[in-house]
Image: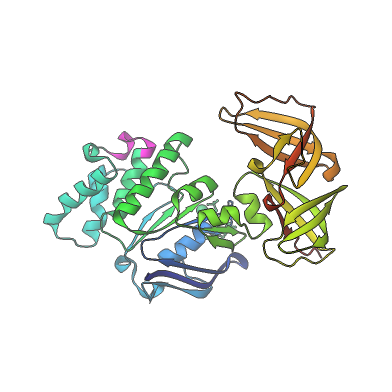
Amino acid sequence: MSRMVEVKDVSKSFDGTLAVNAVNLVLNRGEFLTIVGPSGCGKTTLLRMIAGFEVPSAGEIRINNDRVESIPPYRRSIGMVFQKLALFPHMTAAQNVAYPLKMRRFEPAQIPSLVDKYLQLVQLGDYAGRYPHELSGGQQQRVAIARALSFSPDLLLLDEPLSALDKKLREEMQLEFRRIQQELGVTTINVTHDQREALVMSDRIAVMNEGVVQQDGTPVDMYRNPENRFVANFIGMTSLFEGTVCATGDGVVSVKSGNVLLQARSNDKVLPVNTRVDCAIRAEQIRIVEDASVYDNSVFGTIEHRIFEGDRIVYTVHVEDLGGARLHLFDHDPVSHKEYPANERVRLGWNARDLFAFQAPQSN
Ligand SMILES: Nc1ncnc2c1ncn2[C@@H]1O[C@H](COP(=O)(O)OP(=O)(O)OP(=O)(O)O)[C@@H](O)[C@H]1O
Ligand SMILES: [Mg+2]
């Protein structure tokens, strides 16, 4: 596979504050990468450097093997959809899509058919004559996507283009986007703080926090094998509590947390006895059980609250024995299963392979 984007040891500081810290990323042609992370972690700054709008304080960025800052903006083959919508309000949908073609001096005779092709692709063939204020939010975003794609860029950069849309439309647009990206085979970097969007759309995900890429991998791998507490907590509904290693084995450790001894997986890391660890468990791996004998781990707790979400119930259980930890769990069959009211004592069970133990960061 040929390499399309290479980000090497890239940092960016604004007035002494490090917004992006020594980031490395490689993207192959045709891949869809999502950069996901909380607000302020440096996603837009990284994207703007890749686009060539912002110069790194250190490191280098190559697109198709060329240093991006050496290519003048009008020659960069990059389509971009911004965090804040930037359609030209005084131009129709068709004029907006034609704009980059005119700027790049496409043959005028070619332009109408290209505009038509890309408006059709985003299913707005009948809306060519509408102005932005005559389109819904989702339709405006689709025009912005058509405009970013109309000149067949090598690289498409998307900065949270769906974040302003309501949940249902956003989820439809995620699938729509993915379809268009695969149909065109265009290399894409998408930025979002929505973990679901990252999991649904991407070939690869990079999770960022405080300017640093915490982990980079396929959606399935990120979900199954988070490398640290931040990634485990950011992807999925995860409960966290602290503990200390009291015995260590092959990929499995015994952890003492509160008054309980638990079996956990250490993700191939060697965690010596007495290591302070952060334990993480996903809501779908914990069961309310009568008989805990089939599970590696079991604790008693008190239902604190439950949230009915239609297709599932989310319980929060207070576990005094785990130092007062609160564990979240799902019941995916709220129709036929018993519902547990608040304050009921329950027994929880889960397996060692589903409890991650990460070395806790050193505190000074
Ligand atoms: N031009 C600038 N001057 C000074 N500080 C900046 C500038 N641009 C960004 N920052 C700072 O850099 C950090 C990263 O900002 P950035 O916009 O990249 O975050 P983000 O991950 O895109 O956040 P969001 O999800 O809210 O869009 C923030 O602390 C921000 O205040
Ligand atoms: Mg941003």
Indicate left or right for 185 with 164 as reference.
left
In the rendered image, residue 134 lying in the magenta stretch gets the answer yes
Quadrant in which the N terminus appears: bottom left
Residue displayed at 81% across by 55% down: 255
Identify whether 335 is placed above or below 169: above
Compared to residue 49, the image places residue 344 above or below, namely above
The quadrant of the picture showing ligand 1 is bottom right
Q: Residue at x 71, y 62 (%)?
A: 251
User: Magenta-highlighted stretch: main secondary structure?
Assistant: helix
Boundaries of the magenta span: 131-138
Is residue 86 visible to us here?
Answer: no
181 or 345, which is in the foreground?
A: 345
Residue 12 lies in the magenta stretch = no
Residue at (68% x, 56% y) in the render: 229
Which of the 4 quarters of the picture holds residue 104?
bottom left
Q: Can you give x and y, in whole percent of width and height, for residue 26 in the image?
A: 46, 68
Q: Position of residue 286 (x, y in %)?
A: 69, 41
Q: In this view, does 65 lie above or below 118?
A: below
Q: In this view, does 14 lie to the left or right of 149?
A: right
Q: Which of 283 and 21 is in front in this view?
A: 283
Q: Nearer the viewer, residue 67 or 337?
A: 337
